[in-house]
Amino acid sequence: MPKLQPIRKETIETNEPVNLSDRAIDNIQFIRETMERSTHFTAVPGYGGALMGFTAVGAAYIASQQLYLRDWLVVWLTEACLAFAIGILAMWQKSKMASTPLVSVPGKKFALGFAPPLVAGVAITLGLWRYQHFEVMAPAWMLLYGAAIVCGGAFSVRVVPIMGWCFMALGALSFAVSASYGNIFMGASFGLLHIVFGAIIARRYGG
């Protein structure tokens, strides 16, 4: 008896169907993360900001012990240079950990918004020093630094401009009280505000 040959062979597909809902969720999450990276500067340092706050509290104490206004100014200018170095280093480290370039488009926008009030602060400080108006330096610094954070923070997460407005509020309030409270307000703004908001940023926005 001749051997029978099958007329047609059927292949059975073993691949499972793709779950379209899972892929859609992954795509939506990818798009959202991409848009956030492209519109927000997220390298604002949380832990670095907190460290800046601790050094400012120490500077406020040291400045309060000075007998001469010139020495008081040297203390705070030294603190400003130290805080600037800490901030730059912390931003670089955070951007490296997040694999996000520090000179990205949002980063450039943040810098362009942040820089003008700081440049104005340098010019105003030189003018106040020339005319020996040391008593209004602290309020001016708080107001201008707060304005820098608000302007730069427009391209960052929401908590950053909120911190800037708090700086400006303390700066405006310090104009209404005696100049002898200047170090207290400087410690409360550059110290405590940096510590509190730095902790919030570190916890919610990756360090």
Image (cartoon, rainbow, N blue to C red):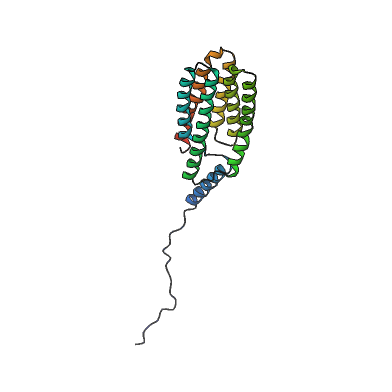
Of the 4 image quadrants, the one containing the N terminus is bottom left
Above or below residue 41? Residue 175 is above
Q: Position of residue 174 (x, y in %)?
A: 57, 16
- Residue 87 drawn at (x, y percent): 51, 35
Quadrant in which residue 38 is drawn: top right
Q: Determine whether, in the image, residue 1 is placed left or right of residue 30.
A: left
Q: In this view, which residue lies farthest toward the top? A: 178
Farthest residue toward the left? 1
Viewport quadrant of the C terminus: top left
Residue at horizontal 60%, vertical 26%? 144
- Residue 162, percent across and down? 55, 28
Q: Disc count in the image?
A: 0
Foreground residue among 203 and 6: 203
Q: Find residue 161 and report its horizontal and vertical position in percent.
A: 57, 30
